Image (tube, rainbow, N blue to C red):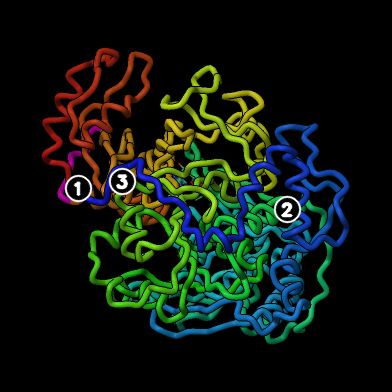
Amino acid sequence: MTTTEGPAAQTVAPDPEFAAQAVAKADLYERAAADRLGFWAEQAREHVTWDTGFTDVLDWSNAPFAKWFVGGTLNVAVNCVDRHVAAGNGERVALHFEGEPGDTVSLTYAQLQEQVCRAANALSALGVGPGDRVAIYLPMLVESVVAMLACARLGAPHSVVFGGFSADALHSRIVDAEAKVVITCDGSYRRGKPTALKPAVDAALAKGAPSVTNVLVVRRNGEDVAWTQGRDVWWHEALEAAPPEHEAQSFDAEQPLFILYTSGTTGKPKGILHTSGGYLVQAAYTTRNVFDLRPERDVYWCTADIGWVTGHSYVVYGPLANGATQVIYEGTPDTPDKDRWWSVVEKHGVTILYTAPTAIRTCMKWGEEFPARHDLSSLRVLGSVGENINPEAWNWYRRVIGGGRTPVVDTWWQTETGAQMIAPLPGVTALKAGSAQVPLPGIAAEVVDDAGEPLGHGQAGYLVLTEPWPSMLRGIWGDEQRFKDTYWARFPGRYFAGDGAKRDEDGDIWLLGRVDDVMNVSGHRLSTAEIESALVSHPDVAEAAVVGATDETTGQAVVAFVILRGGHAEGPDTVADLRAHVGKEIGPIAKPRSIMVVAELPKTRSGKIMRRLLRDVAEHRPTGDVTTLTDSTVMDSIRSGMGASAGD
Ligand code: PRX
């Protein structure tokens, strides 16, 4: 990576013209600091329409199980759709859909309302009611947004499973959530080719999922699909048959809104539970302030897939609660050519763009000629999320995509936090390339040492959140103990994020990556343990160790070391077989970049695999301290075999 884009600590002062009109004002910090709960009450009243007003802002008496906006009732879908129609904005475009092959649909808020009502009626007709779980396995389609909102309207928590996950991964998520209905489609388009999606649902259900009564199937690409009579229902038929009006029920602020599975430090993904009122308040407040969103004139585009939390909070709930006009795009950025994103920006006059550093670094690699083909002057705010944005990428993003004018906001948050937590406010904060900078007004974060003591500037430690926040997770689905142990035990009373961090001399926060066995590959969260257990489920594998090695484009890459079972010699197809096996068990995103077959793994005397040493090998560094190894010659033999590692 070049370092021609300038030094790391450079700051960019807010443009005076931008600042004069900015949504966010500096006094937000003062107001929040003076009365944090009062501040959140204000945000809750400003951003959400309550059917019954809340009587208490926060009930933390049963910590770490929070209740926000106690006594308040609302309907999340009404907040995201109906209230904008009622306010006279029914003709405003809610979604500009861009299909990968070039087909487009623009849906107004009034049209979205009708679709959501029909879908809610269709789901009710299939027996879905408040509290029932609905699994959604769809690519980026209008129907995906409609499906999520229809569930929200019914008070039926959705569990969206990323379309890139395998049938096995889908199966375990359906079973864990005991979903009643699965919503999917025949297939989609990927790099110009039709791909199938429904077969994965059929395979998942064939493994046994007694809770599922029906599968709703969106017709997207006309792929031939197998059909299970009595179980499978076409989405378009069900919606046509359903009435276009639906009376929404009002739900308690703590009504579960969704479960979203994410990787933790053990093999089993965690079902992160989010509820309605607090989640919506923080999603809406951050979308408006962090992106300087003016719903009446902005065209907003977050490139995330609905399969990830960013697609929940910053494609569906945050922008729609604000009544924004946004773009959703089905395909990859290089189809039909590497300028596809920029052609979409030009076509729709996108003003706010939110994406991940890995995408920015990929575009850097492709070259400036692709964005240069298009007029990107409509852009006025750029956002980044999912992993560290290195200063080079930050500066390139601002210069090449933002024309050197736009603020770039780096936003730190997690599936668990539900919404952005650490980010600058455009028009207020002097921006610093590479740093997420400051906790948002209303959020309290600290960097602490091993003992939980706050660290001074310049010292690296652990990031903790010291006060509860409205969009915090309410638990792990079906596992209260794991929720307490994972997040609240390391530093009692405080939320342990699992990230390393440090403050610089100005007090700005720099994220330093995960401190646990969670990897971040292209902004996707993967657990080393999950991939290891996928590998050892292969009949040829006796033992496996997985590490995340630094990668210029994807941030980290999965590198695996495996020991084959006695009698199995490495064959010409071993590595390819194992990669395919991980793809089948978890999904293509989890396939290791390289797999090395080894005779031994480096272990401490207590039998713990020393991943640190394997990371040294994977990153082609001299091996660190090996004195705690049972057998220090192990590393020599791994190193000497490294040249033969396949797939790298
Ligand atoms: O390590 C941090 C990294 O992504 C993790 C959360 O992943 P996930 O739950 O999948 O959510 C991603 C989208 C919100 C964090 O623990 N991360 C996220 N944003 C940043 C980041 N690391 C550095 N800078 C960021 N802006």
Query: Which-is-in-front pick, marks 2 and 3?
Result: 2
Q: Helix, strand, or loop for circle 2?
A: helix
**Dot label at residue 648:** 1
Q: Position of residue 647 (x, y in %)?
A: 20, 49
Q: Which residues are magenta?
A: 566-572
- What is the CA distance from the residue labelled 2 to the residue labelled 3? 40 Å
Residue 444 is left or right of residue 404, and the answer is right
Q: Mark 1 and mark 2 in contact (Cβ < 8 Å)?
A: no
Residue 224 seen: no
Sort mark 3 into few (<14), some (14-19) or many (20+) by Cα contacts within 10 Å. many
Query: Which-is-in-front pick, marks 2 and 1?
Result: 2
**Dot label at residue 557:** 3
Residue 586 is left or right of residue 549, and the answer is right
Q: In the image, is residue 571 part of the stretch drawn in magenta? A: yes
Q: Quadrant of residue 289?
A: bottom right
Foreground: 512 or 565?
512
Q: Helix, strand, or loop for circle 3?
A: strand
**Dot label at residue 43:** 2
Q: Is residue 163 above or below residue 267?
A: below
Sort mark 2 into few (<14), some (14-19) or many (20+) by Cα contacts within 10 Å. some
Q: Position of residue 55 (x, y in %)?
A: 88, 47
Q: Earlier in the sequence, mark 2 or mark 3?
A: 2
Residue 124 is left or right of residue 25, and the answer is right
Residue placed at 63% from the left, 41% from the top?
443
Residue placed at 39% from the left, 46% from the top?
11
- What is the CA distance from the residue labelled 2 to the residue labelled 1? 49 Å
The amino acid marked with disc number 3 is Ala
Q: Would you say the beta carbon of the disc 2 residue lies within 8 angstroms of ligand 1? A: no
Q: Position of residue 450 (x, y in %)?
A: 49, 19
